[in-house]
């Protein structure tokens, strides 16, 4: 892993190790992928101020998210089907996050179930919830997350209906992979991946398998899920979920100032400025372009987290400077997982940590609370 010097190295390795349908599932955005590309382009366009002759020998990356200490302003974002990038992917990523001193978020659409992860790690993790039409299922997921002592519930509010990702359709994405000739040939060239999946606890959506009783057929599960996303979901459902969840609530998928103001009044502990990594509304602005206005609008009434395009410590610096308390990493850690399991995720976090530390030094700041808009170069 030492020769993996940047997230792009992990991405290239993951591309070689993971079957095409799952690698492209991670890469893709919706439709023309304009928002996906804007997330990266707009981050890269933000230039940092080089400052000199400041004593930066003692630097600390520590901060707090939701009042809990973290070793850097980063958490792992919820990612569906991590367990198809590498067998037991969710457990491995959670272990790497915890070892690095940052939170891990388990997706509703994970391969390992809530209980699998809870039984395999020794610290609480966050659980991400999708609101399904079957509210009995939603209630049961909340109860299972509470029983597993999850330390926050991340309610995703930007996926009431699924944005189309062309490559998933073209690749015939399914879990486990459909055994058509192209897939078989592809998997035959990915033996390490196949072995890790064969050894993994589960081969399908762990959180659903028990609930959708008697319907173990994978195609049925996939169809059930696609039909279950609920277009009626509205702010009243947020109230209902908040009334069921005893702990901290995070609203993920806010991209508009008006929505951010409403979110701040719900009693949620945090919101995540996010466009779902460019996988939902294509044509939406990049996350980073709306972050400053949202941060200004909500002030200190709610914690502001950020995701979309984070691939380096420099990117974390940019987002924190523009008002985020911390960032969520999506694809960057997924590449690590595909490239090398737990060690790969650990390496992804380490790369971004080291980059942030050096970036702080070269911009003349020594602690996270000193990162503000002053570190951004005038354009
Ligand atoms: C492969 C993939 C699967 C995802 N699955 C989920 C999910 O199950 N739940 C969710 O709230 N967000 C999901 N997201 C969105 C991420 O949580 C996050 O918002 C996004 O990846 C951030 O952008 P980045 O990948 O550029 O860091 C997914 C993103 C990717 C790339």
Image (cartoon, grey):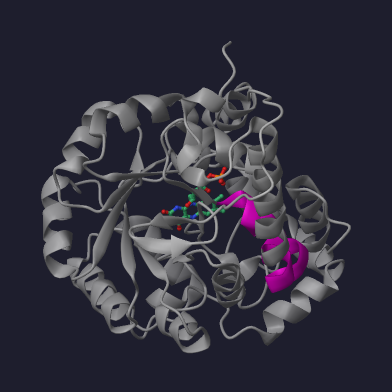
Is 82 drawn above or below residue 172 in the view shown? below
Q: Where in the figure is residue 59, as x and y percent of width and height? A: 62, 49
Q: Residue furthest top?
A: 379
Q: Where in the figure is residue 153, as x and y percent of width and height? A: 31, 64
Q: Where in the figure is residue 282, as x and y percent of width and height? A: 47, 30
Residue 340 in sight in this render? yes
Based on the picture, tell me whether residue 355 belongs to the magenta stretch.
Answer: no
Q: Nearer the viewer, residue 72 or 217?
A: 72
The magenta stretch is 330-345
Is 266 drawn above or below residue 281 in the view shown? below
Q: Where does the N terminus fall, quadrant-wise?
A: bottom right
Name the residue located 71 percent from the left edge and 43 percent from the top edge.
358
Q: Is residue 346 left or right of residue 128?
A: right
Name the residue located 58 percent from the left edge and 78 percent from the top edge.
203
Is 15 drawn above or below residue 137 in the view shown? above
Q: Where in the figure is residue 14, as x and y percent of width and height? A: 77, 57
Q: Residue furthest bottom?
A: 119
Q: Is residue 257 left or right of residue 330?
A: left
Instruction: Examine the image and state in which quarter residue 378 appears.
Output: top right
Q: Assign the magenta stretch its main secondary structure.
A: helix
Instruction: Examine the image and state in which quarter residue 186 appears.
Output: bottom right
Q: Nearer the viewer, residue 192 or 294?
A: 294
Q: Nearer the viewer, residue 315 or 199?
A: 315
Number of numbered discs present?
0
Based on the picture, tell me whether residue 333 belongs to the magenta stretch.
Answer: yes
Residue 177 in sight in this render? no
Q: Where does the C terminus fall, quadrant-wise?
A: top right
Name the residue located 31 percent from the left edge and 59 percent from the top edge.
228
């Amino acid at each position: 892993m030492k020769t993996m010097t940047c997230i792009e190295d992990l991405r290239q390795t993951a591309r070689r190790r993971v079957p095409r349908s799952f690698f492209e599932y991670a890469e893709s955005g919706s439709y023309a992928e304009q928002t996906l590309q804007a997330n990266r382009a707009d981050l890269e366009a933000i230039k940092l101020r080089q400052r000199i002759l400041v004593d930066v020998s003692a630097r600390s990356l520590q901060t707090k998210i939701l009042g809990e200490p973290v070793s850097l302003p980063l958490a792992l974002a919820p990612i569906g089907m991590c367990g198809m990038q590498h067998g037991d992917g969710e457990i491995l990523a959670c272990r790497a996050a915890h070892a690095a001193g940052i939170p891990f978020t388990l997706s509703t659409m994970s391969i390992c179930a809530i209980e699998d992860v809870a039984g395999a790690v020794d610290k609480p993790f966050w659980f991400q919830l999708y609101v399904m039409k079957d509210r009995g299922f939603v209630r049961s997921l909340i109860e299972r997350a509470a029983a597993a002592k999850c330390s926050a519930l991340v309610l995703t509010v930007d996926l009431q209906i699924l944005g189309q990702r062309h490559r998933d359709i073209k690749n015939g994405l399914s879990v486990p992979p459909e055994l058509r000739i192209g897939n078989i040939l592809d998997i035959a060239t990915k033996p390490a991946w196949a072995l890790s999946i064969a050894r993994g606890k589960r081969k399908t959506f762990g959180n659903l398998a028990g609930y959708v009783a008697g319907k173990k057929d994978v195609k049925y599960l996939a169809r059930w899920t696609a039909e279950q996303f609920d277009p009626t979901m509205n702010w009243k459902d947020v109230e209902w979920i908040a009334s069921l969840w005893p702990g901290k609530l995070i609203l993920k998928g806010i991209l508009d100032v008006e929505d951010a103001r409403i979110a701040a009044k719900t009693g949620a502990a945090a919101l995540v400025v996010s466009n779902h990594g460019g996988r939902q509304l294509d044509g939406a602005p990049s996350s980073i372009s709306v972050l400053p206005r949202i941060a200004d609008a909500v002030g200190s009434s709610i914690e502001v987290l950020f995701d979309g395009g984070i691939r380096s410590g420099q990117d974390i610096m940019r987002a924190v400077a523009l008002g985020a308390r911390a960032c969520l990493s999506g694809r960057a850690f997924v590449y690590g997982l595909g490239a090398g399991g737990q060690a790969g995720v650990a390496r992804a976090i380490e790369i971004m940590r080291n980059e942030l530390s050096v970036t702080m030094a070269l911009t003349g700041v020594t602690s996270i609370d000193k990162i503000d808009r002053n570190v951004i170069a005038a354009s």
